[in-house]
Structure formats: C-alpha cells, structure tokens
Amino acid sequence: MPPEVLIRQLRQNDAGALRELDSRILGRDRSATWDRYVERFLRVADLETMILPPWGCHVAELHGDLIGFILAEWQPTGYGLPPGARIVAVAVHPAHRNRGIGRKLIEALAAECAQSGIDQVFSILRTEDERDIRFLQACGFDAASTTVLSRRI
C-alpha cells in the first residue's frame, strides 16, 4: 500500500464523497440490497449530532480523496448466523486496486473487532462473486459451515 494512503474511521463529512465513490465503482448496475445497506450507513454519517463514528466503518484516503471503504456491523446471534462482525460492503476504486488497500481496510475492521471483544468477521456473498470471494480468501477468510438455500418464485 502506498505510504500516503490513510486508513481511518468514517467521519460525518465523508458521506457525500463515499456516495460518489460508490457510484463511480458500481455505476447504475447496483442491487437494491447494496443501495439499502450503503444508504443506511450513510444516513448515520449524515447526522449532524453524530458524536462517535459508526462502528465498523472505515475509509481509505489518498491526498484528501476517498479511494476505498469498508462498512460492517455487529451481528448478534440470529437467523443461523454466527455472532460477530458482518461486512456489508468493501470497495476500492478500480484505479487503486491490487495495492493492499482493501486488505488494510479489513485489518482496520479486525482491529476494531478485537478492541470490542468480537472474535469473528464474516461476509455473505453470492457464489458468482468470484473476485470478492478470492479477495476475502486472500485476507484469511474461509468458507463457513452455514448453507443458504433458496427457491425462486
């Protein structure tokens, strides 16, 4: 990772830049789930009265510009999922990928989890998200024992 890249917690004034980065990375082809989760985190970041940054949310900054982010949330036991931190979204601008920035975002989340007494981080991905699966595996993630079944209606 270039030394001038700063990994830090999401701040209140980051919401607009994060929305812009999200749009540049994903364009118009975004799922409703992505929109709902990203917007929920950003609504929290837009609050004028926010005293503490949202838990599990970090950005990568280069020369004042946001070039990556990770949004996660604490996940209690429920719905067959293990307790821990669940990664909702992690992304790095395409021009800055393969430089260790995504890995540093994962490490920032892991450090925050350790400080909070959380000993597991997980992400739920579609089978066809091969690039994302490879990235998480390279960061030390393994397949979980949970199986999700679905039926198209």
Image (spheres, helix red, strand yellow):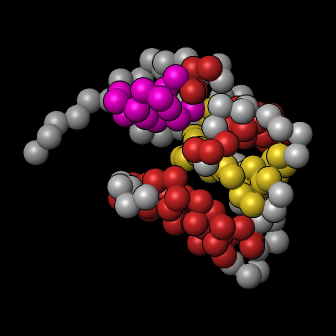
Q: Residue at x 73, y 32 (%)?
A: 100
Q: Residue furthest front?
A: 95
**How many numbered dots are placed on residues in this image?**
0
Reply yes or no: does residue 100 show up in magenta. no
- Residue 46 rendering spot, x and y as whole percentages: 66, 76
* Furthest-right residue in this view: 3
- Do we see residue 72 in this rendering? no
Vertical side of 125 occupied by 74: above or below? below
Instruction: Measuring from the top left, give residue 35's x and y in whole percent.
Output: 44, 61
Q: Residue at x 52, y 23 (%)?
A: 134
Query: Between residues 122 and 126, which one lies in front from this camera angle?
Result: 126
Q: Magenta stretch: residue 127 in it? A: yes
Q: Is residue 135 left or right of residue 63?
A: left
Query: Is residue 140 at all visible to an observer of this figure?
Result: yes
Depth order, front residue of 75/5: 5
The magenta stretch spans which residues? Answer: 122-134
Q: Is residue 135 left or right of residue 45?
A: left
Looking at the figure, which quarter contains the C terminus? top left
Spot occupied by residue 117 in the image (x, y as percentages of width and height): 78, 36
Where is the N terminus found, in terms of image quarters?
top right
| In this view, 139 is above or below 23 | above
Quadrant of the rendered image containing residue 119: top right
Which residue sits at x=89%, y=39%?
3
Residue 20 located left or right of residue 55: left
Q: Identify the residue at the far left of this view.
A: 153
